[in-house]
Image (spheres, rainbow, N blue to C red):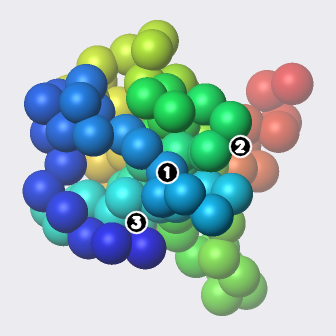
Amino acid sequence: MPKTNLNQHFIDNKLVCPSGKPSIEFNCNQLPGFHVRVTATSPGIGTYVQSYKDESGKRRHLKIGRTTDMTFKEARARGAQIRADVLSGGDPQSEAMALK
């Protein structure tokens, strides 16, 4: 998982999965746990994801949205909100499941 300076230009131009790999995650070096996942079957299109540890210490991954549906700025703001919720004691994934 390479760390990179994610921005809208990177999202628009560099979302490519290396040949021979099924997927890759590009980690944001400005927001811990925030990354973009790109699969070999969908070059140029990625999924924004915020990772965090739940109360038991298990790593969780919460999908924020597709790169085609929202801007990098919107996704990063949502990732920062998820991170703030986790740091204040919340579990966004269990809260999302309760809304369904």
Between the C-alphas of marks 2 and 1, the distance is 32 Å
First-in-chain label (2 vs 1)? 1
> What residue did someone put label 2 on?
95
Q: Is residue 91 visible?
A: no
- Outermost residue, bottom direction? 57
> What residue did someone put label 3 on?
33
| Count of picture labels | 3
Between the C-alphas of marks 3 and 1, the distance is 20 Å
> What residue did someone put label 1 on?
17
Estimate the x, y position of residue 49 in percent, counting from the top left.
Answer: 51, 48
Q: Residue at x 37, y 40 (%)?
A: 15
Q: Nearer the viewer, mark 3 or mark 1?
A: 1
Estimate the x, y position of residue 21 in percent, counting from the top left.
Answer: 62, 63
Above or below for 9 versus 51: above
Estimate the x, y position of residue 98 in percent, counting from the top left.
Answer: 83, 36
Q: Residue at x 19, y 63 (%)?
A: 4
